[in-house]
Image: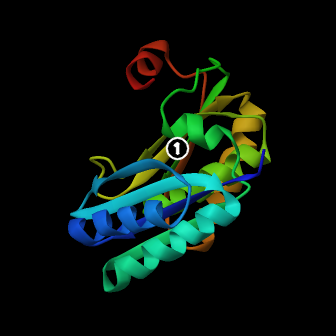
Amino acid sequence: MAEQAIAFVETNSIAAGIAAADACLKRAEVELLEARPICPGKFMVLFRGEMSQVQNALTAGVSVAAESLVDYLFLARVHPSIFTALALTSVPRRGEALGIIETVTAAVCIVASDVAAKAADVNLLEIRLADGLGGKSFVLMDGTVADVEAAVAAGAAKVSLEGLLVRQVVISQLHPSVREKIM
């Protein structure tokens, strides 16, 4: 199986975003993961597939988005747990700690999540992309305290370089009532 890549296109126009999504899927064989409005009044397109196909689709989407383009991302050799966390199908390990990285943008949250998952043995639980969050995004992960600390530190460091980190938190022994409500 070819290595997987993921790409993201964000526009400041709903119409331009839909047109970009259409162009991506007409240009290459990719799997559309998301195509929806996000706060505040923007549109996101998220897709995955074999690296060259994703690159071709992204080129088409960016071209069609034109002056409406806000941000885009191409991430090659993406960690497989990104896909389960985006689909909300991860099974919590009930690890010792919960890690949270909160970012300013959706695209950089995907990058932070990938870096975190590659840095330590953590379970990405959820990646929430700008859905009712005023454009912000976050990733939740669990595992041992040491692994969660290492993963959060790595992901947050990457995001901090671009000035797009809102907050990073590691919570040891999350209270069961809080765990029940958020997972």
Count the labels in the image. Answer: 1
Q: Is residue 99 visible?
A: no
Residue 100's image quarter? Answer: top right
Q: Position of residue 144 (x, y in %)?
A: 74, 27
Is 107 positioned to the left or the right of 50 in the image? left
Is 135 positioned to the left or the right of 31 in the image? left
Nearer-the-camera pick, 26 or 9: 26
Q: Tag 1, which secondary structure?
A: strand
Residue 50's image quarter? Answer: bottom right
Is 120 positioned to the left or the right of 176 in the image? right
Q: Position of residue 66 (x, y in %)?
A: 36, 84
Identify the residue at image location x=72%, y=31%. 145
Eyeballing the image, is 71 above or below 50? below
Q: Position of residue 78 (x, y in %)?
A: 69, 52
Nearer-the-camera pick, 155 or 96: 155
Nearer-the-camera pick, 139 or 173: 139
Identify the residue at image location x=47%, y=20%. 179
Give the labeled residue for mark 1.
139
Identify the residue at image location x=50%, y=18%. 175
Nearer-the-camera pick, 39 or 157: 39
Categorize mark 1 by other alpha carbons within 10 Å: few (<14), some (14-19), many (20+): many
Q: Quadrant of the C terminus?
A: top left
Identify the residue at image location x=71%, y=41%. 149
